[in-house]
Amino acid sequence: MSKMEKTKNGLFDSFARKTTYLRLSVTDRCDLRCTYCMSEKMQFLPRSNVLSFEEMYRLCLIFMKNGVRKIRITGGEPLVRKYIISFFQMLSPHLKNGDLDEMTLTTNGTLLGKYAKDLFEAGVRRVNVSLDTLDVDRYKQVTRIGDLEKVLNGIEAALDAGLKIKLNAVAMRGAFEDELDELMRFAHSKNMDLTLIEEMPLGIDGFDRKNTHLPLDELRKTIEEKYALSPIALSTGGPAKYVRVEETGGRLGFITPMSCDFCSSCNRVRIGCTGKLFTCMGLEGSVDLLEPLRNQVRDEDLENLIKETIMNKPKGHNFAILNDGVRGIKRNMSELGG
Ligand code: SAM
Ligand code: SF4
C-alpha cells in the first residue's frame, strides 16, 4: 500500500462534490489541426511557458495526496511532447503502490504505433483515441493535415500491446451523419466503445459552430431509425451515457456537455500545460499554479491554493449554441486540456 500520507479531507467544492480525477495537459502543440479545435495557423507557446515534467509531477503528488485517484494525460497531442514516456514512468510507481487507480491518456492516435508498448509497460491500460471518420479524404478535411492510415496502424498497435481503446468522435452536421454507421461498426468489430461528443463552443474565432453543431438527441433519433439501442446501467464515472447497440453487440456513448447534465456529479479538474488550474471547462477563468511553482512556494501553500480554488468551483457552465448566436469560451480545447 501507499506510503504517501493522505490528508483526510480531500478536495471538495462548496456543492459537496469531491475531486478525484485530474486531467493534465502536457503540451499545447499538436501534429493535427482539427477544424473544431484549432485554427490552421497556430501560434504555439514558447516552451519555457510550459510546465516541466518535474513541475507536473509535483502537482500530481499534491493531487494524489488529496484524494485524486485517476490522472488523464492530454493536450494538445500528448504524444508529441518530447520524452513523454518518461513522464508516464514517473507516475507509474503510484499505480503499483495504490495511490492511483488509473493513469490514462487521450490521443489522436497518430503516434500510438511508436508508443503503445511503452505506454502499456508504464501501466496504462486504457486509451481514448479521437477519430471522427474512416474516410481518408474527410479525415484530411477535418484534421487538415492528418494521415488516416497512421491512426489505423496506431489503433492496431495499441490493441496488440494489450491496451483497451475507446473511440471518441465529435458529432458534426453533414457527412459525419452518413459515416457514423461505418465508424460504429469498425469500433464494435474491434471490441471498442464509441463515444459521441457534442461540439462545444471553445476557442477559434470565425468558425461558425451553428453550421456544424449537431445536437446528440437529434443524432440519436437518426441512429434509432436503423438500430435498436438498449439502455445499460454502465457507469464509467464520467459524463457519457451508454447504450448497447443490439445489432453490433457494442456500446455507444453520448456526451452532451451543452446540456450540463453531468455538472451536478462532476468529479474532475483540469490543469493546462502552462499550469493554469481550471475547475470548469465551460467558464472563463483559471488560477495560475506556474508562478508559485517557480517561486519555490512550499507544498503546503500550493496545496492550500489548490483547495481554495476547488472550493470555488462553479455549479455548472453557461456556454450555449443558440439561434441568435454562440455563448462560448475564448480559449480552445487544446489550451485547456481536452
Ligand atoms: N489531441 C488529443 C485528441 O485529439 O484526442 C487530446 C486533446 S483533444 C483537445 C481532446 C478531445 O477534445 C478530442 O476528443 C477532441 O475531439 C475534443 N475536442 C476538441 N475541440 C472540441 C470542441 N470544440 N468540442 C468538442 N470536443 C472537442
Ligand atoms: Fe490536435 Fe486533438 Fe485538437 Fe485535433 S482535437 S487539433 S488532435 S488537440
Image (cartoon, helix red, strand yellow):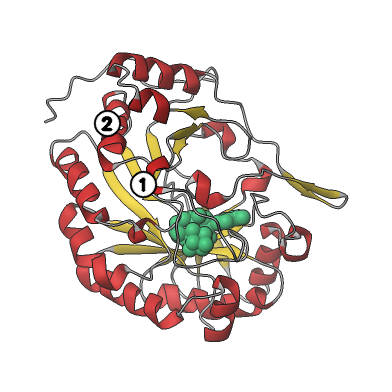
Who is closer to the viewer here, 65 or 254?
65
Query: Sequence order check: which comes first, mark 2 or mark 1?
Result: 2
Can residue 251 be seen from the camera position used here?
Answer: yes
Residue 38 vs 293, above or below: the answer is below
Quick one: SS at disc 1? Answer: strand
Q: Amino acid at mark 1?
A: Arg
Residue 200: where, in percent of width, then height?
65, 52
The residue carrying mark 2 has its beta carbon less than 8 Å from ligand 1: no
Indicate the quadrant where residue 312 lies. top right
Disc 2 marks a residue whose amino acid type is: Arg
Residue 32 on image: x %, y %: 49, 68
Q: Which mark is residue 58?
A: 2
For residue 141, which numbered disc appears in the image? Answer: none
Are circles 2 and 1 on residues that touch, CB within 8 Å?
A: no
Residue 180 picture location, percent across and down: 58, 75
Q: Secondary structure at mark 2?
A: helix
Q: Which one is in front in this view, the residue at disc 2 or the one at disc 1?
A: 2
Depth check: 295 or 265 in front?
Answer: 295
* Disc ID at residue 72: 1
Residue depicted at 42% across the width and 35% down the height: 275
